[in-house]
Image (cartoon, helix red, strand yellow):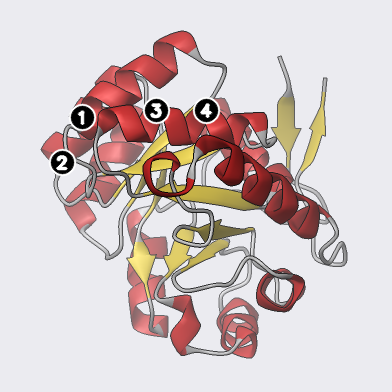
Amino acid sequence: MRSSSWSAGVVPVSSDSRVVDVLGEIAAQRIVPVLRSRGPADAIATARACARGGMRVIELTHSTADVESAVRVLVEQDDLIVGVGTVTDPDQVRASVALGARFIVSYAFDSQVVETAVELGVVVIPGAFTATEVANCRRAGASAVKLFPAHLVEPSYLGDLRAVMPGTEFMVTGGIPSTPEGIHPWLDAGALAVGLGSALGNAAADGADEVERRCRKALGIGQAGSKERPQWQTSS
C-alpha cells in the first residue's frame, strides 16, 4: 500500500491518513477525469477506458443517471479510486461514502456537504470562484478547492489566490483543453490537479478505445507539467 506525505513545508488541512493518501494520489496523477455519462453502463465503460489509459483516480458525477450503480461496480470490481461529483446535499455524501467513494466534489460550496464529508473522513473538494468563496471552503475544512469554471479566468488568477491563501490546494476544472497549452499553465500556476470532462469524451459517444487514447495522452501531458511547485511524494 502506498502512503503519501506533504513536502516543502506545506501543511495538509487534515492529518487523517485516508484524506492524505487520496490527495496524494490526485496530486501524483495530475489529471482527473470528470465523467458525465449517459447512464451507469456508459460510466463503467468510460471509467475502465480511463483506467486502461493510466488513470486510477476517477470522478463520476450525479449528472449521470443512477450513478450509484456505477460507483458500486467500480469500487467492488476495479482497482480504482472513485470519487463522486456534483454532490449537493449531505445525504448524497453519506450514500456515496457508503458505496465506497473516496472523495466528494461539488461545483459550489455547501457547508453541510463539507462538514458531512469531514465527519466521515473522506476528501472533500467544494467548488469556488472568488477569494471569499475559497476562504469559506477553507474555513469549513475542505481538503482542497475546485476552481470552477476555470476557463473564465487566466492561470495567473490561481496564482493570486494561492499567494494570499498559502497551503490551500486547488483542482481546476471547467472548459480546459487537453493540450499542453491548456494544461501546463495551470500546473505552472500551482494547481494540485486539472479536471478534464468533455475533452476526454465518453465510451458511448466516442468509443472506449478513443477515450483510452485521450486519457493516455492527457496523462502524459500532465506528467510533463511543472515540477517547481511543492509536490506530493508517494512511496511504497
Query: Quick one: quadrant of the N terminus?
Result: top right
Q: Verify CB contact (< 8 Å) between mark 2 and mark 4.
A: no
- Of the numbered discs 3 and 1, the one sitting upstream in the chain is 3
Q: Secondary structure at mark 4?
A: helix
- Of the numbered discs 3 and 2, the one sitting upstream in the chain is 3
Q: In the displayed structure, does residue 199 sit left or right of residue 68?
A: right
Measuring from the top left, give residue 175's x and y in whole percent: 47, 74
What crowding class fits label 3: few (fewer than 14 Cα within 10 Å), some (14-19), or many (20 or more)? many
What crowding class fits label 4: few (fewer than 14 Cα within 10 Å), some (14-19), or many (20 or more)? many
Q: Verify CB contact (< 8 Å) between mark 3 and mark 2.
A: no
Query: Disc 4 and disc 3: Cα gap in Å?
Result: 6 Å
- Of the numbered discs 1 and 4, the one sitting upstream in the chain is 4
1 vs 4, front mark:
4
The image's mark for residue 48 is 4
Identify residue for label 3: 44
Q: In the displayed structure, does residue 92 sit left or right of residue 200?
A: left
Q: Secondary structure at mark 1?
A: helix
What crowding class fits label 1: few (fewer than 14 Cα within 10 Å), some (14-19), or many (20 or more)? some
Q: Quadrant of residue 116?
A: top left
**Vertical side of 220 occupied by 186: above or below:** below
Q: In the displayed structure, does residue 36 sit left or right of residue 169?
A: left
**Vertical side of 79 occupied by 114: above or below:** below
Query: Disc 2 and disc 1: Cα gap in Å?
Result: 6 Å
Identify residue for label 1: 94
Identify residue for label 2: 90
Residue type, numbered disc 2: Pro
Q: Name the residue nearer the viewer: 26 or 17.
A: 26
